[in-house]
Amino acid sequence: MTDLPSTSRRSALQTLGAAVLAPVLISACAHSPAIVGSPSALMAKGTRRRVVVLGAGWGGLTTARHLRETAPELEVVVLERNPIFWSCPLSNKWLIDVVDTEFLMHSYAEPARKYGYTFVQTEVIHIERDKKRVLTAKGYVDYDWLVVSAGIKVSYEPWFGNDQRAIDHVQAHYSSAYVPSAEHLGLKRRIKEFKGGTIVMTLPPPPHRCPPSPYERACLMAAHFQKNKIPAKIVILDPKPRIAPIGLGYRQAFEELYSKTITYVPNAGVKEIDPFNRVAKTAAGDFKFDDAILMGHHQAAELTWKLGAIGRTADGKPTNWAAVHPQLYNLKDDPQVYVIGDSVGAVSPQFGHYPKAGHVANRQGRSVAQYIAQQAKGEAPTPLLIDNLCYMLVNPDPLEAINVQFDYKIGPEGHLIQTQIDDNERRLSLWKEDLRWYGLMMDEFARG
């Protein structure tokens, strides 16, 4: 897909691509046993230099596809623990059947075959940066370049410490469905079977993954309950002082479409969760619930921690996010190791983190493919500026969406500057743009 100037990006989107693969069942993450004894090689090191990509989401698959174009002389290996690709963007719409399962789910084998990289389903056990080696449940893989695009980890420890019983109870009964897993099936079932009462949604404190947007999810759940005359109340407990981003568009949706169903509570940072007695205690008061979507704190994915890439604060505490170059995304002490996507830490004193969105991961994957190609030729990487584009469906009947766009430039002091453009007017044309945008993305890296 050709990069477009911000003024014409949405208007120039083309028609939706080819039909997606036939539906398959959602599978939970496949956890393999750790290696016992001395590991053997998963694949022998050949004559070509090798790029290993950890994680096959929006960022990892984009990196692999574009590396085959920008650096065809390199071998590309993608390691992923899940057996199938599941896309979080548009998953909120799937929860209430606006889109069906095959829209979100794809085979890993077909794009690997089409673009000529190797895909291996396996669990990563450890990363030995001194040996330039990744240890997996199936053996080790040597690399010349490493790209980690593993998404996020949802952490409940800030609420429960080491109380594993409480954590397990939340994951079993009130999970957030924020990462590709069977949690999505569980949440969809809970929504469809809900007969009435109060549902509490605790929003993660920022920074957190954007899609699936919690505000969008609340709107679509409210629409489902109202359409089916289910006496439900959704209470959004937001630690922020106001709705953001797209504050006006969401506020209008809450007030004009869902005032009888949605209650928005700002400054409601969680102090304590009692999942057994179903009470959320927050800075804005205590809230009892019949059901809940308890969105724990977000942090960099476990693989990023295994990489040793987590940044530190001035007093030595972990930032919980990867410390990388703000435009090149490589580690400062290891220029051939990259972290992209949601695990990336703060990159600018003006806005902090990039939006943790699939579009950003895609753009970073494209960029890193170019950087590695330049390094392979002995050239210094040339930084590329990225962008972000997100659509949110706030009304399924009639279909109406809102939109936010982020553009970036280098400011006079050399820091990244972010410009945010909210499109708050909900309308059908933005939903159509959303489908076209998503189709182009899937055609680029996920469909064979």
Image (spheres, rainbow, N blue to C red):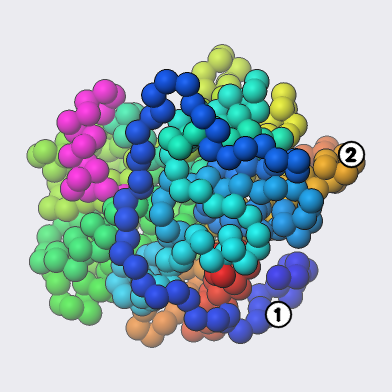
Tell me, for residue 12, which label it has, or none: 1
> Does residue 99 show up magenta in the picture?
no
Q: Nearer the viewer, mark 1 or mark 2?
A: 2
Which residue is located at x 30 percent, y 72 percent?
A: 96
Of the 4 image quadrants, the one containing the N terminus is bottom right
Cα–Cα span, label 1 and label 2: 36 Å
Per the rendered image, the range of residues in magenta is: 160-176
Q: Total marks drawn?
A: 2
* Badge 1 element: loop
Which residue is located at x 19 percent, y 33 percent?
A: 166
Q: As shown in the figure, which amino acid type bears the numbered disc 2?
A: Gly
Locate residue 316: give its quadrant. top right
Rendered position, 12 above or below 333 = below
Locate residue 4: give its quadrant. bottom right
* Badge 2 element: loop
Q: As shown in the figure, which amino acid type bears the numbered disc 1?
A: Ala
Residue 331 picture location, percent across and down: 69, 31
Quick one: 144 or 8, which is closer to the camera?
144
- In-image side of 122 versus 326 (left or right): left
Quick one: 129 or 98, which is closer to the camera?
129
Of the 4 image quadrants, the one containing the C terminus is bottom right
Can residue 193 be seen at all in this image of the molecule?
yes
